[in-house]
Image (spheres, grey):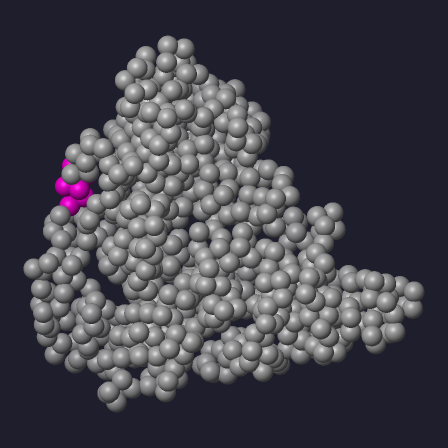
Amino acid sequence: MTTTHSGIANISRRHFLQGAAGLTLAVQMPAFAATLKLRAPPVLIANAFVNVDLDGTVTVIAKHLEMGQGSYTGLATLVAEEMDADWAKVRVEGAPADAAKYNNLLWGATQGTGGSSAMANAHEQMRKAGASARAMLVAAAARAWGVEAGEITIEKSVIKHAASGNSSGFGEFAQAAANEAVPDEPKLKSAEEFRLIGKRIPRVDSKAKINGSAIFTQDVQLPGMLVAVVAHPPRFGASVRGFDAAAARRMPGVFEVVAIPSGVAVVARDYWSAHQAREKLVVDWDESKAWRGSCEDLIADYRKLAAQPGQLAHRAGNPDAALATSAKVFEAEYVFPYLAHAAMEPMNSVIRLGKNMCEVWNGEQAQTMSQSALADIFGLKPEQVKINMLYAGGSFGRRASLGSDYLKEAAYIVKALAKSKLAGRPVKLIWSREDDMRAGWYRPLYVHRLRAGVDARGKLVAWQHRIVGQSLLKGSPLEATVAKNGGIDHTSVEGAVNLPYSILNLGVDLHTTDVPVPVLWWRSVGSTHTAYSTETFIDEIAAATGKDPVAWRLELLADKPRHLAALTLAAERANWSGKASDSRKGRGVAVHESFNSVVAQIADVSIDDGAIRIEKVVVAVDCGMAINPDVIRAQMEGGLGYGLAAALHSEITLVDGKVEQSNFDNYIPLRIDEMPQVEVHIVPSDAAPTGVGEPATPVIAPAVANAIARLTGKRLYRLPFKLA
């Protein structure tokens, strides 16, 4: 039975213990349970998010996946702040899959992590969870000591009553607190009372990741576990007509070879055995429906579409008329390639099928969708699919696959083995780096065409933005949102339809293309391309009309206080004077809003023998209340580096329907020697927190491109950059 007080789920203690992920893992995975600290059951389960043990340890149940972005630390900070807990005695474990208790409040009845929404949706919920647990501990102490609750204070998990001299740790009152009433509206601290929020405190996952005790899907070893790999079609749209597995089955350690909807799976005792056997497979691929196009063909087709009006996504004033009467019109066309997510840990999952149940171990980003997908395959109810949430080695959107692709692959393998002598044995599916590069999914390829007009005084009076590319939502469980939005996929036009600059006549239209290359959101989604086209185009106009690019932006942002604050702070900290202090360097600026956060960046760039070097980047971010400034800085640095890779190197190219890239030798990430010095400044704010995981990524490419233009006079209209 579940009741809710102020957004905090209060569940039965027996039911919660049955679903506690940490305890379940230790019991059911003895092969690697030694790497987990086996804990006694908590004695205080204050709500769905906070437990307290007899030794005073506070366990925070995190409904959001920790994939390197610091969500565990942020969520735990919110709880610990309101509890006045000792940070050294706070631990975090992933929540079980249960949308009724752990839904993303910004998404409705769906549990998942994405869209830089963890802190934005959970900050008040987690603070109330911590405040509720604190109130119950205080009530128990007040009852035991015969004093008023208002006379009790807590400092670093120690409950104190100054007048009587009584003092006890959380653990001593945890059991008694379990019998106290859950407050309907727990009192929250004011900002002046914060001792953890806004301070630099150690990440809760650092130690385990440094000493190797952190559990990722690759670490899972279950009794009798099998390992599987899949041979995927060489072209998208192809399928298996037949296969010869005789040679593969003769390989040492191989147990079975089975066909599944997405290819042919080899099941073996370990990864290397399965991988080697896959090389021996002879698969007859039916390519009658395969796509055999190329990226250059797509670009040519997209350019033709970009010359014609598309479906209207946004309109203010009359941009066509304003362009026709402008004193000067500027035009530019931009090309953006397919991009892989290239997470450090490729896709993987472990699935065990039992009687009327299925259990999953993985770094899960979309619990509700995965539960539904697996339930359909196994003929179960979604609640019969149990997901144990582990750490994930990055994602950048890839693990939030709307089709649950790699999880479904593992499920189909398990299902294919269900009537064999291997039935009941858990299966770990592992994608290699090459699988992840060539079997999908990608940030779509886009072509943009922009036109803008200025009057005789140089005032920007017209702006027309046309975008051509695939929809991320078409054919997915979220396709209905496109229909509700008049046929416009908002992920294709975000960052363009909400252009912050004051322009009276502005239009954005969209051509949505139908290409069988699988696409998926990529870190910062639509802003990955719209930020670049808008921020380089506005810069080009500024240069052509003799305007300082910062001063002009500030003028056009007069009614956007958050943009003004971020850009002003970046310019001040970078000592902006319109040019770099060194004549051999170029200096560029860009500012963009995504996921309700505003990021401004100023980049200093040099070029040596044709090689672009980003020397330094000054970043200013307005992300509301800074829960953990160190995590924010890390996300600004990491997001910036990720965006730099796409600007300088990364692209997925297809020729004759085949992906040319395979690994990090030909899909180039940012190397450590290319990472610039980064200086991060956070705009002070007491507003609700907004996203930080993605907003730095789309800003760096235009900032660098604008610096290159100021240094060389060359504008770059295609990514990745090529100076020659």
Residue drawn at x 27%, y 79% as measured from the top left? 415
Coordinates of residue 280 in the picture (x, y in percent):
15, 71
Task: Give left or right: position of 125 versus 142.
Answer: left
548 or 1, which lies in front?
Answer: 1
Task: Give left or right: position of 633 versus 296.
Answer: right
609 or 530, which lies in front?
Answer: 530
Q: Which residues are magenta?
A: 294-300
549 or 130, which lies in front?
Answer: 130
Coordinates of residue 394 in the picture (x, y in percent):
42, 57
Residue drawn at x 62%, y 41% as measured from the top left? 685
Please determine whether, in this image, residue 362 is positioned above or below residue 655.
Answer: below
Whether residue 270 appears in this view of the structure is no
Residue drawn at x 77%, y 61% as measured from the top left? 155
Magenta span includes 690: no
Residue drawn at x 37%, y 65% as measured from the top left? 369
Residue 287, quarter of the rendered image? bottom left
Coordinates of residue 291 in the picture (x, y in percent):
13, 53
Task: Give left or right: position of 198 versus 453.
Answer: right
Residue 704, quarter of the rendered image? top left
Quadrant of image for the C terminus: top left
Coordinates of residue 9 in the picture (x, y in percent):
58, 69
Magenta span includes 298: yes
Q: What secondary structure prevails in the magenta region?
A: helix
Please determine whether, in this image, residue 647 is positioned above or below residue 485.
Answer: above
